[in-house]
């Protein structure tokens, strides 16, 4: 198949490019390098089945030739990034989604939208199933990301209902692994960098808030299954690891795995920071036959080794 991936030079996007190429597909990657980097895809440039176009999907989008699948993964994804680029974040998940959906309609392509667990906000239901509507502050500082993704989900489903487009939505929970930026701003890169530098690990609040962490290889496997399986038009899938850890537990694990002498300091917690976050992946298990295989300790060891070579 001929596959278009936006956000191709990002953390998740670059791994997706690799996976589709490995399966024998032709891949066209788009990225404007706002948060992605050419380093993530440099090793793919010599692959004859890979084409890269530096482009911002908030502009009119046209690709020559047939396209079988479009994966819209372009968007700043860490709080640091989307708070530094609030308007562009909202544009890429409104205008960018509209442009990529329009291209999918023109080409008759299957469309996979990268949503997020942030659509659930600070959830009142735990764990979070796909039919939970969420608890989101529409005017808080995180709303530029949360509401942009919620709008994109609505727009994606509108194209499905009005135009019969084959769309699928993946709600991605916390994911980590090689190729995350050192200054990404998310908790695992922060903690690993601080531990390797011997600096105190900065825990926001008391550290008892929980998250669920999925290793990148597991996530990509889930996305690939959503993308290629027949008969999933209009479906939404949680993709994440259902194992739940407190932030304080995570900090202690990273100190242990890195062999660091770092301590832990506690800072004020950001506004609207979710108390608990854990995916209900019953649907993914049943429909896709998918569940994560890499545990947190093993995934952190792999990630720490990648960071150790770069810090």
Image (cartoon, rainbow, N blue to C red):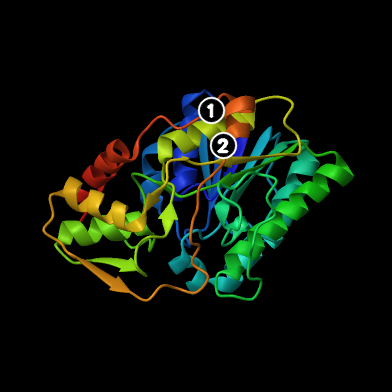
In the picture, the disc for residue 290 is: 1
Cβ–Cβ below 8 Å for labels 1 and 2? Answer: yes
Q: Evaluate whether residue 60 shows in this view.
A: no
User: Marks 1 and 2: which is nearer the front?
Assistant: 2
Tag 2 secondary structure: loop
> What is the residue that sits farthest to the right in this orientation?
162
Q: Position of residue 212 (x, y in %)?
A: 44, 47
Q: Position of residue 149 (x, y in %)?
A: 64, 58
Determine the image quadrant of residue 196: bottom left
Depth check, front residue: 61 or 228: 228
Q: Which mark is residue 281?
A: 2
Query: In the drawing, does residue 149 fall left or right of residue 159?
Result: left
Residue at 13% in and 55% down = 260
- x then y, percent, for residue 261: 11, 58
Label 2 Cα crowd, 10 Å radius (few <14 / some 14-19 / many 20+): many
Q: How many marks?
A: 2
Q: Secondary structure at mark 1?
A: loop
Query: Which quadrant of the rendered structure holds the C terminus?
Result: bottom left
Residue at 51 percent of width and 60 percent of height: 76
Which labelled disc corresponds to residue 299?
none
Residue 202 against residue 123 in the figure, above or below: below
Residue located at (46% from left, 26% from top): 22
Marks 1 and 2 sit apart, C-alpha to C-alpha, by 9 Å
Q: Nearer the viewer, residue 254 or 162?
A: 254
For this view, does 78 lie left or right of residue 144?
A: left
For the residue pair 66 and 311, the one nearer the viewer reads as 311
The residue shown at (57%, 57%) is 118
Can see residue 130? yes
Displayed quadrant of residue 90: bottom right
Quadrant for the N terminus in the image = top right
């Amino acid at each position: 198949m001929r596959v278009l991936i936006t956000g191709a030079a990002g953390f998740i996007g670059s791994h997706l490019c690799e996976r589709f190429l490995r399966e024998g597909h032709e891949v066209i990657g788009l990225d404007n390098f706002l948060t992605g980097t050419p380093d993530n895809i440099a090793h793919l440039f010599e692959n004859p089945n890979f084409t890269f176009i530096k482009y911002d999907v908030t502009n009119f989008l046209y690709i020559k030739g047939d396209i079988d699948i479009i994966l819209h993964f372009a968007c700043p994804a860490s709080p640091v990034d989307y708070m530094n680029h609030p308007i562009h974040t909202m544009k890429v998940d409104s205008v960018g989604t509209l442009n990529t959906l329009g291209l999918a309609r023109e080409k008759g392509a299957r469309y996979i939208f990268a949503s997020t667990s942030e659509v659930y906000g600070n959830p009142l239901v735990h764990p979070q199933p796909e039919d939970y509507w969420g608890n989101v502050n529409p005017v808080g500082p995180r709303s530029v990301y949360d509401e942009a993704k919620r709008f994109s989900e609505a727009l994606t489903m509108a194209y499905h209902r009005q135009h019969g487009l084959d769309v699928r939505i993946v709600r991605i929970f916390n994911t980590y692994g090689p190729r995350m930026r050192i200054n990404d701003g998310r908790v695992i890169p922060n903690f690993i960098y601080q531990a390797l530098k011997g600096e105190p690990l900065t825990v926001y609040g008391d550290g008892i808030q929980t998250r669920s962490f999925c290793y990148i290889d597991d996530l990509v496997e889930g996305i690939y299954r959503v993308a290629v399986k027949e008969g999933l038009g209009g479906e939404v899938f949680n993709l994440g690891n259902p194992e739940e850890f407190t932030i304080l537990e995570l900090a202690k694990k990273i100190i242990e795995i890195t062999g660091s002498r770092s301590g832990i300091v506690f800072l004020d917690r950001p506004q609207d920071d979710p108390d608990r976050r854990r995916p209900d992946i019953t649907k993914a298990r049943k429909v896709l036959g998918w569940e994560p295989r890499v545990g947190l300790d093993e995934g952190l060891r792999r990630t720490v080794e990648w960071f150790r070579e770069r810090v």
